[in-house]
Image: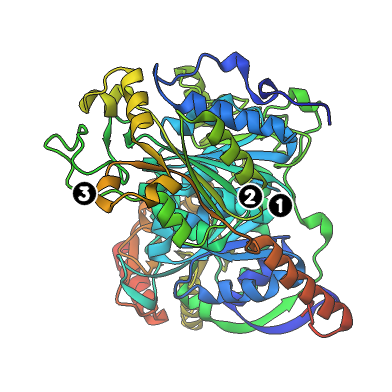
Amino acid sequence: MKGSNKVRFMQGNEAMAEGAFAAGARFYAGYPITPSSEIAEISARRLPQLGGVYVQMEDELGSMAAIIGASAAGKKSFTATSGPGFSLMQENLGVAVMAEVPCVIINVQRSGPSTGLATKPAQGDFMQSRWGTHGDHGIIVISPSTVEDCYYLMIKAFNFSEKYRTPVVFLADEIIGHLQERVVINDIDPEDIVTRELPSCDPEDYKPFEIGESGIAPLAYYGSEYIVRLTSSTHDESGYSNSKPENADKFIRHYTDKIEKNKKDITIVRKYNLEDADYAIITFGCTTRSALEAVEILKAEGKKVGILQLVTLWPFADDEVLEVCNQVKGVVVPELNLGQLIREVERVNKKNIPIVGVNKVNSLSIHPNEIIDKIREVEKCQR
Amino acid sequence: MPKMKMEDYLIEKKLPFFWCAGCGDGIVLSSILKSFANLGYDRKNTVVVTGIGCWGKADDYINTHTFHGTHGRALAFATGIKLANPKLNVIVLMGDGDGATIGGNHLIHAARRNVDITAILVNNFNYGMTGGQYSGTTPEESYTITSRYGHIEPSFDLCNLVEAAGAPYVARGSVYHVVQLQKFIEEGLQKKGFSFIEVISTCPTHFGRLNGMKKAPDIMRWIKDNSVSIAAAEKLSPEELEKKFVLGKFADRDIPDYSTKYQAIIDKCTAKAAKGGVTIER
């Protein structure tokens, strides 16, 4: 970006695409689906200008496969989709986990299940983003609540993906994807862009799954001096199929451990008004906006209510949520689903304070008053 | 480049092959590796992409870059690899279940899109690895573990399918006709654009056993006796052609490949930008 601190009026989907380019993404493969299609349209126009490649695949199975292939060949890669497409991508998302190939998958959530309400918002993929592909694995999921987030958090998503050799899910929603608001685009310091660690050993000694000092195996790309063997099958350090129990145990644990052990680095939360709060609202994505409004209304009434916004959804911010549960008298969890985030909050709630959900699946966003009503309900639990 | 040998591309420490006695996979693999050697392929500039199935295990023996993906998706992984770096030689190995059944959609679209990839599909008429169930190429009326009363579905003619989908190079060979097979593979590798080579192959363990060809020579003889050239096939009636394998080249035509056309778009966009016609930095 030439010229620093540009002020732009942008759409969320546009900011996600531009954020990806700023992060160094030069390959997009996807299949059109509402409400994410603008990301494909912008990528098709912008990528050739940047020397990159856009390809529209025959389905989301192929899209996910193509971005993995392109990333292995050395291009930072991404795709964008929504509900039905995200379901299809789960197959090869597992390949990115198993072969440890960096890539970013944007899911602009819409109302489901199945075809559902294609143009309406939801947050029903919170659990799918964590557990959608089969088998034990770790994954990083990032969720924006503003258009500015769409830009800057996208850069973080790519950075985590490259640093930890993992797929990262960027879990947006229709409200944020189609929202238009002011964004200040700052110059990105090249040092803030992370690119995967390349091997430095003798090419003859290179093993693509040999865990290095950083806890992550350096990843060479196809066409380099280092022969790279990548596979969706359980494999040894060299990338050969290996069915020995001790080998399977080592690598399957590694996929979870490499994320969990770096939780401190990966976890991003935002706190509003929490310092002396009596009650807390725990949010992610679009519901954060309703919660911010609710807090302002309650403040005018003299009530001390704060917000813990989870920006990193997975790995789950156990410590930060526990800290809030230990501090306040009650928690409200608004979400556009029938109660997915609240299960995790309840899991870490050791003091058993009251936790109440605001759950909506009628395709409308949560009104601040609906959160305020639940705060009053939680207050009553105290009396 | 020093003269290369088949062994330069073979991981000998992984031998013997895990394939059954009488399986055609080893014959196809040796044809491919000999073709690499004859063309002087640089191992470090070559990526072999495989799917799932008996033939999908071939990458375990190949000393180039490899990608072993999910069932049916090898062409989609390969598309990403090739478009990201068009200088790479990208070869895709698929079976009939993998490439033509679960992966059928990727096959026709890869042919239509014309990405410069060479796809070698080994057709043994059933899912060998999972115990011999019928696939999209199992001949009608034949027997498999899931068509015990005779198969009632017609099979795909893969070469006709891929030719119709627009591939520049399409050929069918067999594991019996190895000289011809290697010629097709070498031509396919050299062809710019999507090349498709179907190889009629043997599965004595499953398909052969249930169809009266328990021993490897029986099934090899079945392929030999039922193969006809394209020229000979033209003189036969449709009835006479039933249950025959028509071997030969179905297409060999020059069509600009995807990366060449896409590079033209990149050049146009970046040239316009240099003249100030397109604002890249918005």
Same chain under badges 3 and 2? The reply is: yes
Asked if the residues shown at circle 3 and circle 1 are in contact, with their CB atoms under 8 angstroms apart, the answer is no
Residue A5 appears left or right of A279: right
Residue that sits furthest to the left in the current view = B149
Quadrant (top left, top right, bottom left, bottom right) of the N terminus of chain A: bottom right
Quadrant (top left, top right, bottom left, bottom right) of the C terminus of chain A: bottom left
Q: Earlier in the sequence, mark 3 or mark 1?
A: 1
Vertical placement of B47 versus A142: above or below? above
Residue A156 visible to the viewer: yes
Residue carrying label 3: B153
Q: Residue at x 66, y 76 (%)?
A: A45
Q: Secondary structure at mark 1?
A: loop
Residue B178 appears left or right of A381: right
Q: Position of residue B275 (x, y in %)?
A: 88, 82
Q: Residue at x 47, y 77 (%)?
A: A175
Residue carrying label 1: B85
Q: Position of residue B75 (x, y in %)?
A: 52, 49
Same chain under badges 1 and 2? The reply is: yes
| Real-space Cα separation, disc 3 to disc 2, in angstroms | 35 Å
Residue type marked 3: Glu
Relative depth, front residue between A132 and A313: A132
Residue type marked 1: Asn
Asked if the residues shown at circle 3 and circle 2 are in contact, with their CB atoms under 8 angstroms apart, the answer is no
Q: Position of residue B59 (x, y in %)?
A: 55, 31
Q: Quadrant of residue B213?
A: top left
Residue carrying label 2: B81
Q: Secondary structure at mark 3?
A: loop
Residue A126 visible to the viewer: no
| Real-space Cα separation, disc 1 to disc 2, in angstroms | 6 Å
- Label 1 resides on the chain identified as B
Residue type marked 2: Ile
Vertical placement of B272 versus B151: above or below? below
